[in-house]
Structure formats: structure tokens, C-alpha cells
Image (cartoon, helix red, strand yellow):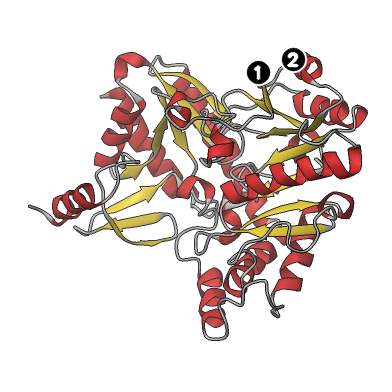
């Protein structure tokens, strides 16, 4: 067997089959390119679901990690460390907020946001104990913990994991009327993705996010924006909410915050909201560790220049123009997205999203399918226009075959 076949066979034999990866085995990567164990190079148009916004092996991030590795990597939150205050201060400033509660994974951050909203509801809003409700949107993807999949509408994510956590109300994404009707005196928060990534890069109707902001403010309900995939430059702004001039009560961040080097996530909000926590009521051994803070501080510094947001906006306009041309030719039924992020619905006659992804892999381009007929395109923000065009040419080749 080839090196690729050997590695895949070993993985199949010794790991749980909770993923169905494309049959490529990556050995190294730099910038927007990955190299497999056979020495073949592939253009990465997925960027780790936006975790690799700054590319593979970004020198600033690697150097920051190496320097911190020589000093201290973990103290736990039992002690202070010298990177923590700067991380919290700089991230709060980037978000225009006051306080940060750091965690590790995106799902941990969403769980933290849920706990924050409930505690705020009981201690500040005065909701009767055990009665707090959080409104979410259909077709959401916020993670895979038991509580989070309890309010998923995706059968694959939800099936066979019950009993499910109560306290959530699901309404159609983009429907302000349904949101208004679902609100009660016990509603403590509305948790939504400003753009739904896993659902196929769904952009809500114009005016939806401002409407959510207005409704939540009127009803004394927290607006929680899950910007784990959409945030930190992906859409051409630091946050996707900015496209509609909206500032939520709470940002949930992850993925790109760790630069693709270490897992870093955070809930960022006001002192009035995050101030509900007292010592011992929530925590994480690794959350806000020195290594994570060092890398995230460099990510924040890179975002403060605005260059990555500008690049995502400019190249994103180019990406959507080119994809829009494909949408008129019969092979592509629809294109959605914003910035360097697109969901492309493939005409069923050409194959499933998985089949198109496999054909693109043969052309040395890596993307990922979702919901049957859709492929997602989300290259590192530092990709060159030439490389992006090369990848789009390969897509045209596959769709015309």
C-alpha cells in the first residue's frame, strides 16, 4: 500500500469513525498550501473552518508560541500569569467590550455563554429559578456538547444523544416575527450566528440583525452573537455583525483566535453581564493559559492593523464575482456568503457536495461539503489572488467535466 493508504487504514482501524475525511494525509503546510505524505501539494480552501485565517505556519504566530514555550505554558487559574491581563485587555478593546472569560474550544465558549445568560437572567433580570429560556435559530451549529445538540435541528448531530437539555426555543433563522412571538418574560437571551456556517454559509436577510438587536433591547434580553467562524476577519470586517452596524451584548469567539496553533476561545461582554460570576462558579484548567494568551495576543495585534479585514473584503468581492458567473451556467444553483467565505450549491446532476470535493482533491484543491449538495470555500485570509484564481480554475474544470 502507499503511504496514504497505510495511514488511512491505520486510522480507520484505531480511531472512532466520527468523521469522514477526504482521503488525503497531510504531512506539512505553509501559507495556503498543504503537502501530503506522498509529497503532493494542495491548495487549502477550507482553512480549518476559519481556524487558520492567518495561514499555516504563520511566522508571527509560530514565533510567539516558541517564545512562550521557553517560559511557561500552564499555571492553571489558581495563579496569575504575566500574559493574562494583556490578553483580556486587548481582546476586550478589539471587541469594544469590557470583560473577557477565556476558554479553549468553541463549544466550551458557547456553553459558557449559555451559563452566563442563565445566571444573568436569575440574578439581574429576576427570572424565577429554573425557568430561563434561550431562543436559538433553526439550522444552527454551535458545537457538539450534550446541551448544545439539544437545540440543534440537524438529525446527524442530535440523534441518539437524549435525554436533551431543556430551556431552549427554536425559531426559523431570519424570521423576526417568529422571534418576537417566541419571547416571554422568562427569555434571557437570543443566541444566533450572524452567518450560519455549517448550514451552508447562510447570510440572513438585510435588517434581520438590527431587528434582533432592537427586539432584545426592548425586551431586556441578551443578544449573543456566535462569531466563532464568522468573526476575526473572515467576512471583511472584524465581526460579521459590523456589516449591519450591530453590536451584540456578548461575542462568542474561537477558532481563529488561536491562529490555528492552539485552541483558544472566549466570551466577551460587559462588566454588568460577566460580572455575575463569582469565584468557583465556572472555570477551566487550560482556559486563558500562558501559551494560548501569547498566541492570541499576536492574533489580536494582527487584526488591529485592519489589513486582514481589508484583504478579506477585496479578495472576497473577487471570489463572489467569479462564483456568481458560475451560478449562471447551470452547474451551480446558488452562491451565498460574505468576504472570503462562500457556500456553493452544486446542481444535483453533477454530483453531491462530497463527490465534487473528492474531484477537487484530485485537482489538488481542498474544500469541504455540507448538507448534501453544498461545498464551502473559506481560504486563509492571506491567500494570494493568483492562488485563489488557480483554485477557482480547478473548480471550473471539475464543474465542466
- In the image, 182 versus 337, the foreground residue is 182
Residue 18 lies, in percent from the top left, at: 35, 41
For mark 1, give the secondary structure: loop
Residue 157 in view here: yes
Using a 10 Å C-alpha cutoff, classify the residue at mark 1 as few (fewer than 14 neighbours), some (14 to 19) or many (20 or more): some
Q: In this view, does 261 lie above or below 166?
A: below
214 vs 315, nearest the viewer: 214
Relative to 31, 320 lies left or right:
right
| Quadrant in which the C terminus appears | top left
Where is residue 27? Give x, y as percent. Answer: 29, 61
Q: Residue at x 58, y 66 (%)?
A: 286
How packed is label 2: few (under 14 Cα within 10 Å), some, or many (20 or more)?
A: few
Residue situated furthest left in the rendering:
1
User: Residue 112 vs residue 355: left or right?
Assistant: right
| Residue 173 percent across, percent down from the top left | 66, 22
Q: Mark 1 and mark 2 in contact? Answer it, CB < 8 Å.
A: yes
As drawn, the label of residue 301 is none
Can you identify the residue that label 1 sits on? Answer: 172
Which is nearer the eye, 296 or 154? 154
Q: Earlier in the sequence, mark 1 or mark 2?
A: 1
Residue at 37 percent across and 49 percent down: it is: 43
Residue under the image location 54 percent in, 58 percent down: 54
Q: Which residue shows up at 90% across the image and 37% down it?
A: 126
Q: What residue is disc 2 on?
A: 178
Q: Distance between the residues labelled 1 and 2?
A: 7 Å
Instruction: Please identify the quarter of the rendering in which residue 320 is found.
Output: top right
Amino acid at each position: 500500500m502507499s503511504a496514504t493508504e497505510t495511514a488511512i487504514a491505520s486510522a480507520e482501524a484505531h480511531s472512532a469513525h466520527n468523521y469522514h475525511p477526504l482521503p488525503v494525509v497531510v504531512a506539512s503546510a505553509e501559507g495556503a498550501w498543504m503537502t501530503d505524505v506522498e509529497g503532493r501539494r494542495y491548495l487549502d480552501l477550507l482553512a480549518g473552518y476559519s481556524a487558520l485565517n492567518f495561514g499555516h505556519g504563520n511566522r508571527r504566530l509560530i514565533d510567539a508560541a516558541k517564545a512562550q514555550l521557553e517560559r511557561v505554558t500552564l499555571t492553571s487559574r489558581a495563579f496569575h500569569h504575566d500574559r493574562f491581563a494583556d490578553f483580556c485587555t486587548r481582546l476586550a478593546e478589539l471587541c469594544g467590550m469590557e470583560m473577557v472569560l477565556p476558554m479553549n474550544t468553541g463549544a466550551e465558549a458557547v456553553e459558557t455563554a449559555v451559563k452566563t445568560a442563565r445566571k444573568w437572567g436569575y440574578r439581574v433580570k429576576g427570572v424565577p429559578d429554573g425557568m430561563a429560556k434561550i431562543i436559538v435559530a433553526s439550522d444552527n451549529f454551535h458545537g457538539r456538547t450534550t446541551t448544545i445538540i439539544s437545540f440543534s435541528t440537524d438529525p446527524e448531530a442530535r440523534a441518539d444523544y437524549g435525554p436533551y437539555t431543556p430551556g431552549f426555543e427554536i425559531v426559523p433563522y431570519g424570521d423576526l416575527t417568529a422571534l418576537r412571538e417566541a419571547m416571554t418574560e422568562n427569555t434571557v437571551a437570543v443566541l444566533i450566528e450572524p452567518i450560519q456556517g455549517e448550514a451552508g454559509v447562510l447570510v440572513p436577510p438585510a435588517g434581520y440583525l438590527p431587528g434582533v438587536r432592537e427586539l432584545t433591547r426592548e425586551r431586556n434580553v441578551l443578544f449573543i452573537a456566535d462569531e466563532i467562524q464568522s468573526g476575526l476577519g473572515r467576512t471583511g470586517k472584524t465581526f460579521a455583525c459590523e456589516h449591519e452596524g450591530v453590536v451584540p451584548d456578548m461575542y462568542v469567539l474561537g477558532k481563529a483566535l488561536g491562529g490555528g496553533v492552539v485552541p483558544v476561545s472566549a466570551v466577551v461582554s460587559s462588566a454588568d453581564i460577566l460580572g455575575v460570576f463569582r469565584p468557583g462558579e465556572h472555570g477551566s484548567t487550560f482556559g486563558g493559559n500562558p501559551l494560548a494568551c501569547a498566541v492570541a495576543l499576536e492574533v489580536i495585534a494582527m487584526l488591529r492593523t485592519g489589513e486582514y479585514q481589508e484583504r478579506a473584503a477585496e479578495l472576497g468581492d473577487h471570489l463572489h464575482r467569479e462564483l456568481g458567473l458560475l451560478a449562471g451556467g447551470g452547474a451551480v444553483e446558488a452562491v451565498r456568503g460574505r468576504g472570503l467565505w462562500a457556500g456553493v450549491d452544486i446542481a444535483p446532476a453533477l454530483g453531491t457536495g462530497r463527490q465534487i470535493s473528492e474531484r477537487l482533491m484530485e485537482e489538488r484543491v481542498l474544500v469541504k461539503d455540507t448538507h448534501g449538495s453544498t461545498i464551502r470555500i473559506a481560504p486563509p485570509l492571506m491567500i494570494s489572488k493568483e492562488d485563489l484564481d488557480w483554485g477557482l480554475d480547478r473548480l471550473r474544470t471539475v464543474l465542466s467535466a
